[in-house]
Amino acid sequence: MDLHSGAKIEFRNDTTEISIGRSPQSTIPIRDPNVSSRHLRIFRDDFSFAMIDSSVNGTFVNGVPLMKNEPRRMQSGDEFSLVQNSYKSSDKARHVFMFVEPPPTAAAIGQDHLDSVLTHYHLGRCIGKGNFSEVHIGVHRDSGDRVAVKVVDTLKTEQFSKKSKSVTLNIDSEMQVLRSLDHPNIIRFYGMYRSPTSVHLILEFADGGDLLNRILEQGCYNEKEGRIVFSQICAGVAYLHSRDICHRDLKPDNVLLTADGVAKISDFGLARHASQSENNFRTYCGTPHYFAPEMFKLQKQQVDGYGKAVDVWSLGVILYIIVSGKPPFDDENLGEQVVNGIFEFDGPEFESVTESAKDLISRLMTVDPKLRLTAQEALNHPWLAPCKQNLPGVPSGTTPGCDIVMMD
C-alpha cells in the first residue's frame, strides 16, 4: 500500500506480473510527474519474484538505487520507494512499498507458536537499536497497517538486572505504562507478543524519524516551528505527570516525528508511576546530558530521591537544543555544570533567539526543583501562548499500511 494514495495489490497464484507507474494502465497508477509512465515492473517465475526499474528518476531498494533495466530478485521485507530514498528521512519519500511473503504455516513454526508475532506481522528493516532491544518496521499481514515492533531481548535484560544494584529493567512495567496512555503526542501501544527469549511490543509507527536526526540533518528549528514541536512535547509530558508517571529518559532521540512533523514521546523503558511522595524515585538512570541536578546529587548521596521535576529539566535541555542546534553542557565536568546550572546563551546560535524563549529555558532549567516550572506551567508560558489553543492536536493523515502483500 502506498502511504499517500493507499494503492494496494495482492499477489495470488494467478498473478504473474504487476506494474507501477504514471500510466493509467499500470496495475498501481500513481499521479506524480516525477514518476515515470512505466516506472517499475514486478514479475514472478516458478521460484521467486523480481523487479525491473525502467524509470528516469529511479527506484530505491532498502536504501540502495536499483540498477536500471537489470532484474533484481526480491526478498521478504524488501522496502522499495520511487524517486526518493525512504531510508533518508530528509527525502520524505511519498511512494514507499514493502514486499511481504505469506504468513508461516503451523508446520513451519510449530503448533505452540501459532500466535507468535510472525503469524500476524511481517518484520521489515531495523529502524533503531538499543542495548537490549531493536525496533523494526512491522506490517500487519491482514490489514497492511504499518507499525513499529520493539523486540526486547529478555535474556539480556534479566542478566543486566541481576548484575545492576540500582537499575531494574522490567518489560512488564513498560507495557503497563504504555497501556494506560492515550494522548496524541505519545506513541500508542497496540499489543504484545511474548516468547521464551524475547518480547515484541507493537507500537505506533512514526515515519518522520526522531527529533535528534531532524536537527542533525536540517539544523535547529526557527522559533515559529520550534515553538510548535516543543509545545507538543511539553503537552505529552504534562499529560504523563497528570497521571503521576515520570518518563526519566526524555531526550531528542526519544521524541519521534510523523511525516507532518508532529512530535510523539517514545521509549518508556525507564518510566515509572510516582507515589504521593514528591521525591520517591531513588534509581540513578537515564542519559547524563539530560540529567537534572538532583540526579547527580543522588549519585553522591546528597539527596534522598527525586520526582517528576527531572523530566522538566530535560525539557529545558531539549528546548535549548531545538532553538540552537547544540547542547547546553560540555562533556568535561558535566555534573558540576549541571548541579550549578552553568549554561549560557552566547554565540551566534542565540543571536536570533528571543528573550522569551531564553526565559522559558531558564525557568525549566532551574537548579532547585521546587522553583522549577511544572510541565503544565510551561505550557502557560508566554512563549508558548500562540500554540495553547491547538493543544492537544494532531493533523489527520492516512492509515499506514504495507504496500505489496504476497498471498497464497
Image (cartoon, rainbow, N blue to C red):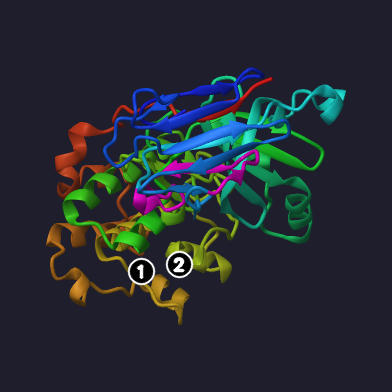
Q: Position of residue 158 (x, y in %)?
A: 77, 50
Q: Is residue 84 above or below residue 366?
A: above
The residue stretch that appears in magenta: 70-91
Name the residue rendered at 66%, 25% in the picture. 120
Between residues 195 and 336, which one lies in front from this camera angle?
195
Q: CA distance from mark 2 to mark 1?
A: 8 Å
* CA neighbours of label 2 inside 10 A, class few (<14), some (14 to 19), many (20+): some
Q: Is residue 73 above or below residue 176?
A: below
* CA neighbours of label 1 inside 10 A, class few (<14), some (14 to 19), many (20+): some
Mark identifier at residue 171 = none
**Residue type at mark 1?**
Pro
- Res 167 → quadrant: bottom right
**Residue type at mark 2?**
His
Determine whether, in the image, residue 202 is placed left or right of residue 107: left
One can see residue 171 in this view = yes
Determine whether, in the image, residue 185 is placed left or right of residue 1: left
Q: Secondary structure at mark 2?
A: helix
Q: Is residue 99 above or below residue 225?
A: above
Q: How many marks?
A: 2
Q: Position of residue 229 (x, y in %)?
A: 28, 46
One can see residue 204 in this view = no
Name the residue rendered at 54%, 49% in the picture. 70
Residue 80 in the magenta stretch? The answer is yes
- Res 262 → quadrant: top left
Q: Position of residue 288 (x, y in %)?
A: 50, 66
Q: Position of residue 233 (x, y in %)?
A: 35, 45
Residue placed furthest toward the front? 69
User: What residue would you read off at disc 1?
Assistant: 327
User: What residue would you read off at disc 2?
Assistant: 289
Dot 2 and dot 1 residues touching (CB under 8 Å): yes
Determine whether, in the image, residue 218 is placed left or right of residue 304: left
Q: Secondary structure at mark 1?
A: loop
